[in-house]
Every structure is written in C-alpha cells, then in structure tokens.
Amino acid sequence: MANKADPRTKELELRLKKTGDKVRTEQASKRKAKGYNTARENLEKLIDGALFREYGQLAVAAQRQRRDYSELQTETAADGVITGIAPVNNKHINLSSDSRLSSHNTVLIVNDYSVLAGTQGYFHHLKLDRILEIAAKQKLPIIMLTEGGGGRPGDTDISTINSGLQCTTFGRWAGLTGKVPRIAVNNGYCFAGNAALFGAADITIATKTSSIGMAGPAMIEGGGLGKFTPAQIGPIEVQASNGVVDIVAETEDHAIKLATSCLSFFQGNANSWQAPDKSTLDTILPSDRRFVYDIKKVILGIIDVDSFIEIAGAYGSAIIQGFARIEGKSIGIIANNCKVLGGAIDVDAAKKLNRFMRLCNQFNIPIVSLCDTPGFMVGPDHEKEGAVRYTSELFVTGASLSVNFIALVIRKCYGLGAQAMLSGSTSSPTYMLSWPQGEFGAMGLEGAIKLGFKKELESQTDPKKRQALFDKLLAQQYDKGKALEVASVLEIDAVIEPCETRDVLIAALG
C-alpha cells in the first residue's frame, strides 16, 4: 500500500488530478455548453466500469519553452489524447473460437478537443505510436474517438524537426488494416490529420453534428480557396451520402454504443438472443413478380431481433449490408434493394460491397447473401463512373473469400451482377439456395426476349399479336429459369420455403 505521507505520492496524486474534469472545470464547462461529453466521460462510457490501463497520462504539450509548466499540466493534459487498454463487451459477448481476437481487451484512443482544439502535437503522436505498437503486438482491436483539428504548429520544445513528415502514426494506423478491427468515432470537428485517421478506419461512425474534412478553415483559406466556417466543411449529410461515414449517430452516447456494438461482431457470440417470427417471411413477396418489396423485412425475418447494424446505408443504397446475428453468432449480410435501381448494382453499391466483404473475410465473419438483382447497372452515364473497374472488382473480392459464404436467391438472379452476389457463380457459395420465387438467367427475362427474338417480334405487325407472342415467349423463359428447374439440373443446391430460411441458415452456419 502506498505511503500517503510520502511527498512523491502526493505529487503523483496532484499531477493525475490535473488531468481530470474535477480540476479542469473550465474546459469541462465549455464541453457541456455545447451539449458534448468531456473526453474522460466518453472514456468511462466505453469501459463501463472496467479498469483502464492508461498510457502517457502525464504527458503535456511540447511547449515548455513558451508556457508555464504547471499551466501546461492542466491546460494540455495528456497532450490532448487519452490512450490505454480496457476490456470492452466482456459482460455480454463470449469470445468465439472463430474470432481472431483472443480477449476482450481493446485499445481505446480518445482525442480531447478541450486541449488545444484536439490538435496533434509531438508527444500526442508519440503516444499514438506507442499504443498502436501495443495493439499490433498484442493483436488488440481499437476504438478511436477522432475529434480534433489536425496538426499543431505551436510545439516549440522540439527544435531539431524541420518538416514533421517523419511522423509514423498514419502509416502505423493504416498498417493495422486486416490485422485488428479499427473503429473510428467522431463528434464535432475533425480535420486534417484527425480526418486522415478517421477515414482510414475499418468502420466509421459520426454524429449528426460532425464536420469532417482533409483541411480545416485556416488551411483552406491559406490555400486561396475561400473562407468557410468549420460547419461548412464536410457536414454529415455530405460525408454519409458519399460513403465516408458508415453509420450516423444521434449523439456521442449513441455513437459509443454503436462502436461497442460493432466491435462485438468481431469478438464473438452474444450471451442472449431472441428469434424473430419466421412465418412473416411467407408473406413478404408480392404475387406479381414486377412489384417491389422491402428487403429489410426479409433480413429482419431471418436474423436475431434487434441485431442488425447497417453499414453505409446512405451510400450506394442499391445494396443493403451490415452486421447481424443468428442465434447469437456474428454474420455479415448483403442484399440487393429492389426499391433502388430495381436492385441493379451501380458503382457506389459495388464500392461499398467490395469493402464490406473484404472486411468480413479479414476477420472470419461468415457472409449471407440475399440475391435479387437484374444485374449490373448499365449505360453511358454509368460507364463514366468507372463501372468496368469497380463492378468487376466484385469478382476479385469474391474469388478471395475464405469464409463461409451462403447465398439465397429471393427472386431475380440475372447476369454478371447476380454472379457477383454469389461470389462468382452458383457453384461458389458453400450452400446455394433459392426461394420458390427465384428466377435465373444470363440477363433479365424481358430483355432476353426482346434481344433474342427480335426478328420474330418485329414480324408481327399487329400490336396485340406481338404482345401475345411476347407474353408466350416470356412464360417459356420463366418456366425454364425458375428455381425448381434450375435445381433439377443441379445449378443450385436447394429450393426452400421462405419460413424455413432461418433454420436452414442456422444449420449451414454450423
């Protein structure tokens, strides 16, 4: 037990208190005035009462030559970033044997905007480098709160650095890609170096009050690009619609809850779960194959109740994707959204789908694909977006998958787009399923008839007879490509009733 009378012990206590909210009352009040948490409060919400092993708590900004040292201890507490390790989700998530994580221990990095606007100084970067090195060695996941203004020009103690480009933080952070899960959370302003860390994360979460940009107002104005307020640079509606932000949170508390929930999918299985009413699946599809329906109702009818977290929902919305659970087990789920472009996969949808499938594969999360697509989006405008490059990459990603990949055709399964949803072909998934409403072909039925029977249709000058011929040919094509017939020649493994889907997936996931 420490000797409380020892002056060195008392000195330690005083120094540590200077980093806390009870001493830094002015800074805490400013945060509260904005409706925000302090950095220490956010940390407490992340660790949920667990012991936090902090690294570098006694650091101050490298400004001893220009400011009073005692003042720095409070004004620049921890040099603007809290770093350390604590268990996360250990109360309700059991580590899975399939997980690449060996414990609940998680590296936590909380940037502190109350210290010099959350800017990154010399010791700030040393702390980041140290904790990222620990994460790499111990294979620990990371949650990083990124609020801050980027590089700091006011550190004067280190006089032998000229450019600052020897900084290794960004390379270390990026180098952890595929090795440990990295979740970035932002609230408020996030510019320059802070934004670079945010954007390079595996999963990005930001509150509605976030503004995220590769340069702040001063740098933009200095570059002769005009004057802007911080709120005008990368507001959330922009960064969510372009794919920078994967999940939009209401508040800091909500963002932290989302971050720990996302992390749980990489850790293992939930202690408890609730099954949905699987009978609802039998009534989701409309009787007319041309009508749209809500694919999210299919997803929610398959997975555990309240387990779905959508990723990049505001971007590339022809695809719906996210993490979910089935009987507590983590899965990645991907699905075509027939309400957007009829379910055709455009460039934005392809980009986000590629990224998500790679992430699942890197961390051994099995994938369930719900296919209902007429194929890839086509046309000159689409080609201007780089369609050939980005949609074709789906085949590269699919070919590289090593995780359990189960595909279920809900309705349409046409062309290259469908093959991309199947990780390459109907023979690529570990289990290739279809509902009875499934229909298969090299291209959409209507288009195939118009193209393949063009001469026959044009020879019918009577519009009614032409339509009758078209309907006849369409029915023939549908009968040939319907799920039951495709299964009869072993192009797919099984046809199941919708209400059986969850039970079949449980068995297939093992």
Image (cartoon, grey):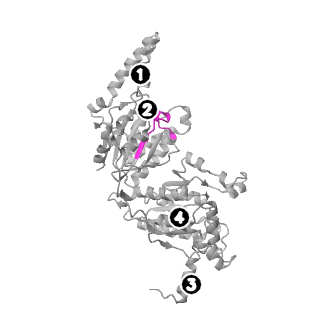
> Of marks 1 and 3, which one's residue comes earlier in the chain?
3
Foreground: 138 or 40?
A: 40
Q: Residues within 10 Å of mark 3 (few under 14, many from 20)?
A: few
Instruction: Please tell me which of labels 2 and 4 falls first in the chain.
Output: 4
Q: Position of residue 74 (x, y in %)?
A: 62, 75
Mark 4 touches mark 3? (CB < 8 Å): no
Residue 97 drawn at (x, y percent): 32, 59
Mark before the other along the chain sequence, 2 or 3? 3
Q: 227 or 387, which is in the foreground?
A: 227
Q: Secondary structure at mark 1?
A: helix
Residue 374, numbered label: 2
Q: Nearer the viewer, mark 2 or mark 3?
A: 3
Q: Secondary structure at mark 3?
A: helix
Q: Which residue is mark 4?
A: 42
Residue 346 highlighted magenta (yes or no): yes
Residue marked by disc 1: 449
Tell me: 407 left or right of 24.
Answer: left
Give the number of the mark in front: 1 or 3: 3
Q: Are marks 2 and 3 in contact (CB under 8 Å)?
A: no
